[in-house]
Amino acid sequence: MKMKDKLKDIFEAIKADEMNQNYSKAGIDPLYAVHPKAKILIIGQAPGQKTQDAGIYWKDKSGDRLRDWLGVTEEDFYKPEQFAILPMDFYFPGKGKSGDLPPRKGFAEKWHPELLELMPEIKFTLLIGNYAQHYYLDIPKTMPSTQVIRNYQDFLPRMLPLPHPSPRNNIWLAKNAWFEVEVIPELRKNVKKWL
């Protein structure tokens, strides 16, 4: 089976999955990007309401900041052969008391392995936020995200944990000035290496 057909089959299977029926009935497609030649993979939390409404992942202020951290243009960011995108959930999970709800349990377990198998060229993976970090890194469940990011060198050269680039994290960024001084240059160096 051709790669294009495999990708289409998985896309349709995600839409047809029982856990996604409410989204599919509302005409909402899963948001992710997979390409067999992609070298850089971004694993985040889940689409926000704005990005789901736009039908384009990272199409918000968080995306603007992420592209700035990466040192890439919007045009380059949206080339799936350069940046593959696999959130922990491909749909907006809804609003909670203090922000968006977490990605649904069991979603990444079900769909990530199948899609990762189609991307053998991935060299560098960015793990954005707590959910992606605790799922993909061999770390204690109780380890705070700040500590995970502080220990970023432990996960190089294949992975790099990042905070969520949301404006909600402005206070965190202000308190942790080392992030922009140490981690952003390391991030840009690796992005440049693989693009």
Image: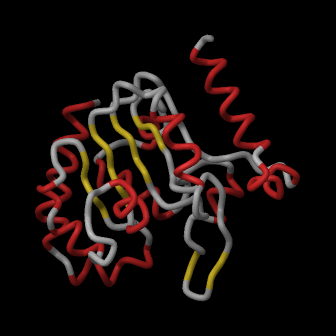
Asked if residue 30 is positioned above or below residue 4 in the image, the reply reads below
From the viewer's side, name the closer residue of 23 and 166: 23
* Picture coordinates of residue 31, whole percent (x, y): 62, 47
Residue that lies at the very extreme toward the bottom in this rendered image: 97
Asked if residue 122 is positioned above or below residue 172 in the image, the reply reads above
- Image quarter where the N terminus lies is top right
Position of 20 with respect to 185 (left or right) is right
- Image quarter where the C terminus lies is top left
* Picture coordinates of residue 111, whole percent (x, y): 57, 43
* Picture coordinates of residue 76, whole percent (x, y): 41, 35
Asked if residue 191 is positioned above or below residue 63 in the image, the reply reads above
Position of 2 with respect to 23 (left or right) is left
Residue that lies at the very extreme toward the right in this rendered image: 25
- Residue 53 in which image quadrant: bottom right
- Residue at 65 percent of width and 66 percent of height: 93
- Residue 41 in which image quadrant: top left
Position of 181 with respect to 158 (left or right) is left
From the viewer's side, name the closer residue of 151 and 83: 151
Asked if residue 174 is positioned above or below residue 79 in the image, the reply reads below
- Residue at 46 percent of width and 37 percent of height: 75
